[in-house]
Amino acid sequence: MVRALRCRCTELTILVPDMAKSAATILCLGADRILMGPGGDLGPVDPQFQIGGRSLASAKEIVAAVDEAEARVTKSPDAYPLFSSLLADVNMLMVEQARSALARSEALVLEALLSNSRRDAERAKELATALKAPLIDDPDSHSAVISADAAAQFGLPAEKFDLQSREWEIIWQLWARYFTLGCWPNGQVAVYEGERASHVIAPPGYNAN
């Protein structure tokens, strides 16, 4: 996606009024500028899987839970019924997909960094190495955050919005509208911005109120 965005512009600016998690963080890695709101943050590159309906669990959590269950059952076979019920919504295919997704995360970070033609391969690899711990290895949950200041310290082109500017006022009004429509946190509504109008896609019968 970030490569597709870069093909359509000479300078890619990503706006982060609130939170950018996982795939959104990957988009930021390919940007020329990352403009972040006062509460804006980047999050871990942490693939998510749907568990038991609508709930989500990270690939890291799935792998850790299965590994812990295997270790405990090996030590105490009588614990098998307990862990079998706790992990009833997780199958082996999902576990393998979670392991593959984790292995792929590091490559995705590097690919996103390399998508910016203003950044040479050596610099992209340096950034990927610096970001591996905060984005992939260290976070123990999907709610882990990286502030604008921290992102800039790691070498990303992150800046803070001028909160007194007209640009920030417009962006925050737009974000508040998305929130009201239900784009976040439930994610049932998608909004596509055109040059002249916004196109809203919602499930049948959905009511944002």
Image (cartoon, helix red, strand yellow):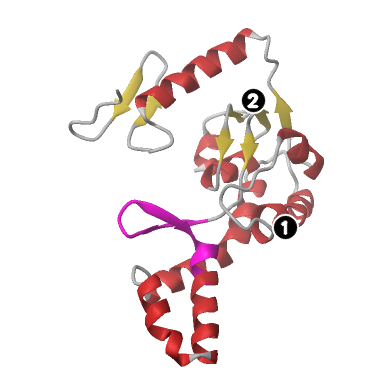
Magenta highlight on residue 62: yes
Find residue 125 and report its image quarter: bottom right
Q: Is residue 113 magenta?
A: no
Q: Position of residue 98 (x, y in %)?
A: 48, 67
- Locate residue 122, reporting x and y percent: 79, 53
- Helix, strand or loop status at disc 1: helix
Q: Quadrant of residue 18?
A: top right
Tag 1 residue: 133
Question: Is residue 101 among the parts visible in the rendering?
Answer: no
Sequence order check: which comes first, mark 1 or mark 2? 2
Residue type, mark 1 in image? Ala
Left or right: where 82 falls relative to 154: left
Q: Is residue 180 left or right of residue 66?
A: left
Q: Measured along the vertical axis of the image, is residue 165 above or below residue 33?
A: above
Image quarter (top left, top right, bottom left or bottom right) of the C terminus: top left
Can residue 43 be seen? Answer: yes
Per the rendering, the mark at residue 37 is 2
Q: What is the secondary structure assignment of the residue under circle 2? A: loop
**Residue 114 placement (x, y as % from top left):** 66, 48
Query: In the image, what residue occupies the spot 58% across and 46% down?
Result: 26
Q: Position of residue 28 (x, y in %)?
A: 61, 39
Residue 17 left/right relative to 132: left
C-alpha distance separating marks 1 and 2: 24 Å
| Residue for point 58% across, 26% down | 17
In the displayed structure, would residue 31 be above or below residue 126?
above
Q: Which residues are magenta?
A: 47-63
Residue at (42, 19) in percent of width and height: 177
